[in-house]
Image (spheres, coloured by chain):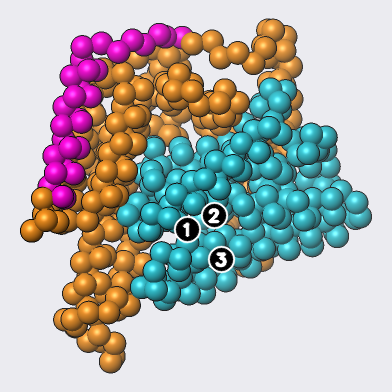
Chain colours: A cyan, B orange
Amino acid sequence: MHIVDGALSNPVVIGGAVLAAGGIAKGLRCLPMEKIPVAGTLSATFFVASLVHVPAGPSSLHLILNGLAGLVLGWAAFPALFVGLLLQAVFFGFGGVTVLGVNTFNIAMPAVIVGCLLRSRLQSGTPEAAAVWGAVGGGLAVALTTFFVALALALTGEQFYNAAKLVFLTHIPVMAIEAFLTGSAIYLTRKVKPELFEAVAGAGS
Amino acid sequence: MSSVLTAVEKPLSATGANRQVSWLGRVDPRVRIVCAAAFAVTVVACDRFGVLIAALCLAGVLMAGSGLPPRRTLRRMAAMDGFILFMLALLPFTVPGEPFLTIWGVSASWEGLAEAARIGLTANAVILALMALVGSMEPVTLGHALHTLRVPATLVHLLMFTVRYIDVLREEYLRLRQAMKARGFRPSTGWHTYRSFGYLVGMMLVRSLERSERILEAMKCRGFTGRLPLLERWSVGARDLAFTAGFAVALVALIAGEVADGAL
C-alpha cells in the first residue's frame, strides 16, 4: 500500500504533502495535552497491530486497520497515522521521504471520513448493530485507501493505469478481512469498554 | 529505547545517553535530518542513470558510516523492493516504446524497463540514506531534534509517546497471543481466526486505554504541564559544519551531473 520515492509526478507529491499537512494540523488542534497519553498509546497499538500478519490462503497479509483508527481517534487519526508512517520509513525502510505526505493522506483521510460518517452510529444501538457499522467502516476505509493509491498513480501518468487497477483488484479480499476484523473488534469494545469511542474523538470534535 | 524500532539492545539509551560511536553518529541529529530531506528532494528530481547510481553509492557510503548492521539494513531495503516489484514489473508492458520482449502477445518496451529501473534506484537510494542518517539515531533523540527544528510540540509528544509504548504494547500483544495459544488457538484461513484476531485487537485497544488513564494520572501527579524538557543541548560545531559542507558538495555534484548530461 506504500508508494515509494520517485514513482509519482511532482504535482501529486506536492499536493499530497499539502493535504497531509492540513489534516495533521486539524488533527493536532483536536488534541489538548490531556489527551496525548491516550492518543499516543492508541497510536502505538495501531502500529503494533499493523505488524500482525493474519493467514489468508497460502500466504498472509498484514493489517491496516485505518477504519478502526478513524472510528476510535476521529481527526486525531491523521497525526497518529502520520507518526506510524514516519517511524516505519525511518526505522524499517518502508515507504519513502518525499511521498510521506501522499502516503499519510492515502491512509489517514479514509480513516477520518469513516470516523466522521459512522462514529455516532457506534454509540447508539446494540453492540450487534455497532459491529455491523464497524464492519462497514473497516471495509470502506480500505476501499477508499486503495482508491486514493490508485488515483495517485493514475494522476501521475497513464503508464500506471494497469498498476492502479491491479492494486484495487488485489485488495478486495483485504477489504473483506479488514471489514470482518474491524466489526469483531468494535463488538468486543462496545461490550467491554464503550467509553473507548469517547476517549479521544469525543468532546473536542 | 524501543527494541521493536531499533532491534538493537541498548540498555542505557532510555535515559537519553548518546552511545553512538560511528563518525556519522557524532554529527548533530538536526543536521542529519535536514541532510536526509535535502538528499531525498535532490535524488527524486534527478533522472539520469549515472546520477542515480552515484546517489545509491553515496547512500551506501552513509550506511557504512552509520554503524547500522549492514546485513539487516540491506535486507530491509530488499523487503521494500519485493513490495514494489509487481508495480515495477508491470511498467515495461504499459509504457509505449521499442519492444524487446513479447509475452502472450503483449510487448515490453525498453523505455518502460528504464522507467522501472529509475524508480527502483531512486527509491532505494532515498530509503537507504534515510535509514543511515536518521534511522541510526535513538527514537528519543529524533523527537528532540524534531522539536528543535520547530515541529509542533503536540506532534513531538505524540511521536515520543508512540515510540515509548510500541514495545510495551507489543509485549501485551505477545501475552495475549500466548494466552490464545494456551487455549488451543491455531491461526488458519477462516472466519473463526479473523473473529479471534478482531477480538485480540479490540482487547489491545481496551488495555491501552486503561493504561493511558494510569499514565495520565502519574503524569499529573508529577506536575506535567506540557513542556518538553530537553535532556541535551546541541550546538553546531566544526564537525557538523564540515559534514554539511561535504554533503552539500555531493548534492551539488549530483545536480551538476544531471544538468550536464541533460545538455548533451
Q: Secondary structure at mark 2?
A: helix
Disc 2 residue crowd, few under 14, some 14–19, many 20+, Cα 10 Å:
many
Q: Which mark is residue A109?
A: none
Q: Is residue B198 visible?
A: no
How much space separates mark 1 and mark 2, taking CA atoms? 9 Å
Q: Residue at x 28, y 50 (%)?
A: B45
Camera-side mark, 1 or 2:
2
Mark 2 or mark 3: which comes first in sequence?
Answer: 2
Q: Residue at x 32, y 43 (%)?
A: B41
Give yes or no for contact between labels 1 and 2 (Cβ–Cβ under 8 Å): yes
Q: Is residue B255 magenta?
A: yes
Q: Quadrant of residue B240?
A: top left
Q: Height in image: B180 above or below B217?
A: below
Mark 1 or mark 2: which comes first in sequence?
Answer: 1
Residue picked out by circle 3: A147
Q: Residue at x 13, y 39 (%)?
A: B253
Q: Three-letter amino acid code at disc 3?
A: Phe
Q: Position of residue A193 (x, y in %)?
A: 81, 40
Q: Which mark is residue A106?
A: 2
Mark 1 or mark 3: which comes first in sequence?
Answer: 1
Residue picked out by circle 1: A1
Q: Three-letter amino acid code at disc 2?
A: Asn
The residues colored magenta run: B231-259
Q: Position of residue B176 (x, y in %)?
A: 63, 41
How much space separates mark 2 and mark 3, taking CA atoms? 9 Å
- Looking at the image, the residue that sits furthest to the right is A125
Q: Position of residue B222 (x, y in %)?
A: 68, 7
Q: Chain of mark 2?
A: A
Q: Is residue B62 visible?
A: yes
Left-right relation of A72 to A174: right
